[in-house]
Amino acid sequence: MTTSSETPALAGAEIPVELLFRVPYGKVLHGRDCQHLSEDRLASLQPATDLDRQKFKVCKTCLVALSGATPDDFDSFEAALEALPIPQVHRPAMREIAEGLDKTRIWIPSSRSYVAVSAGPGQDASAFFNKGFVDLQQDGGGYKRVLMAGFSGTQTNTFAHAPDAAPASCPGCYMQLPATGRCDACD
């Protein structure tokens, strides 16, 4: 779970404390419908106090949602794929994967990095549809990544770093030369 990087009192100061909640013994404040919280944690939410508001950070997702810029919820999976936008070439495979999933809730978070589907509010996402892969929730827990055809999984916007040159060595004893360029043992 991510939290805001500002100090607790500054991040989301405009959000009324009445809209914030805390899981017992938790140190992060959430909105009532936080997608990070499981069903049992949503059921155990306690209203945040003014002291909680001063001490604890607000979940980044809830901070965005409660500030008015909510994640986009969609009525159809197709509309969400179009809004992200997912490449046309990957959509048929993604539709096939989504076919067997409960898509009661379909949303794109404020990060605009994926389309998520779940059985409803408070339920873990059953799948995250990214631009080149899908992370599917497994029965035993965790997620399995399914790569789309033609997706290499490598980032193309990174620059290769040239390897550092090998340090100079003494031609007589083959020891690494100090910064002066003169061998301490041979000279």
Image (cartoon, rainbow, N blue to C red):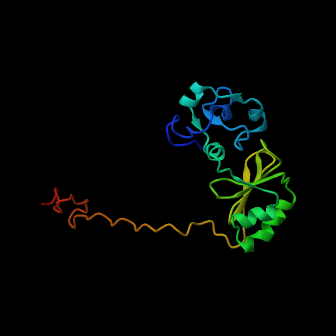
Please indicate whether residue 28 sits to the left or right of residue 7 in the image: right
Quadrant in which the N terminus appears: top right
Q: From the viewer's perspective, is residue 154 above or below residue 33? A: below
Q: From the viewer's perspective, is residue 146 above or below residue 12? A: below
Quarter residue 186 falls in:
bottom left
Foreground of the two, 109 or 136: 109
As drawn, the residue found furthest toward the left would be 187
Residue 81 at what x, y percent from top left? 75, 65
Quarter residue 93 falls in:
bottom right
Quarter residue 134 falls in:
bottom right
Residue 60 at what x, y percent from top left? 60, 44
Q: At 80% from the left edge and 70% from the top edge, which residue is drawn?
A: 92
Residue 29 at what x, y percent from top left? 63, 34
Foreground of the two, 39 or 83: 83
Q: At 75% from the left edge and 39% from the top edge, which residue is drawn?
A: 38
Report the number of numbered marks. Answer: 0
Q: From the viewer's perspective, is residue 76 above or below residue 22? A: below
Quadrant in which the C terminus appears: bottom left
